[in-house]
Image (cartoon, helix red, strand yellow):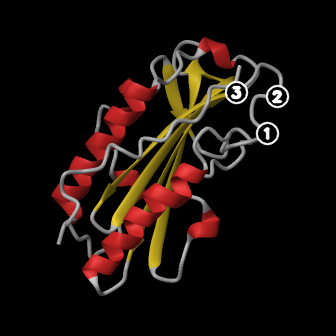
Amino acid sequence: MLASAVLCAACQSASASAHYPDKIDACKLPATNARDRLAPGTVEIPADSVKTADAKVVPQDRSTGNDDVTTCKRLFARDLGGGKPNLQDYRLVTIAVVRFTDSDTADAAAKATQLMTDALSDHSGVRLATGVGDESGFSEQWAAVRSGNVVMGMAIADGGTEAALIPPATLDNVQAEVTDMTKTLQRDYQG
């Protein structure tokens, strides 16, 4: 079963004028409860444990010379008991952060808005990761948010031969996680 990708273009931060001058570590943005919210009944495993396709969270064809793109990929597998992962039933969490580095903060924020409204909406409803879960199907949820000169996107993909056995990520959960990431971004990186 293929779940349509969903774009949360409207869930923009109230702090649209915020500016983030320093490089952002995408892996440090999720809240500490992110694993419980997005991957119940699973254990984290090294990202290269399962061959997966790369999730295209931010379209590369919209990248410019005035941006800083950082990504974070985490992989979870269903727990067979005692922390032993079932590598045939997994969840891939991909986070991408685009920070526009233009010295003109208004121009940087305008470019971030353009990425949200143009490039990402062009991909709404499109399967962003391919070649995953050939036998049992593939499901994906994703959301994106902008704050000032930064656009964050998160994609949750369930795959493998037994993908239905992982409780599916819901759009509400993904949007809640993106909201939490925005709070972390504003607290730890705002200039």
* Residue type at tag 2: Asp
Quadrant of residue 2 in the image? top right
In the picture of the structure, the residue carrying the numbered disc 1 is: 131
Give percent across and percent down for residue 159.
68, 28
| Residue drawn at (44%, 28%) of the image | 171
Question: Which residue position holds label 3?
Answer: 138
Left or right: where does residue 175 sit relative to residue 167? Answer: left
- The number of numbered badges drawn on the structure is 3
Q: Is residue 61 above or below residue 144?
A: below
Mark 3, Cα crowd under 10 Å, few <14 / some 14-19 / many 20+, is many
Which amino acid, by three-letter code, is at mark 1? Answer: Gly
Check residue 64 in the rendering and tell me which mark sits there, or answer none: none
The quarter of the image holding the C terminus is bottom left
Q: Quadrant of the N terminus?
A: top right
Q: Nearer the viewer, residue 75 or 137?
A: 137
Q: Is residue 127 left or right of residue 121?
A: right
Q: CB atoms at circles 3 and 2 under 8 Å apart?
A: no
Helix, strand or loop under label 2: loop
Task: Examine the rendered structure and indicate whether residue 121 appears above or below residue 107.
Answer: above
Q: Are marks 1 and 2 in contact (CB under 8 Å)?
A: yes
Check disc 1: other Cα within 10 Å, few if <14, some if 14-19, many if 20+.
few
| Secondary structure state at the residue bearing disc 3 | loop
Left or right for 6, reference 150: right
| Labels 3 and 1: the sequence-earlier one | 1
Quadrant of res 34: top left
* Disc 1/disc 2 C-alpha distance (Å): 7 Å
Disc 3 residue type (three-letter): Phe
Asked if 53 appears above or below 17 in the picture, the reply is: above
Does residue 129 appear in the picture of this structure?
yes
- The residue that disc 2 covers is 134
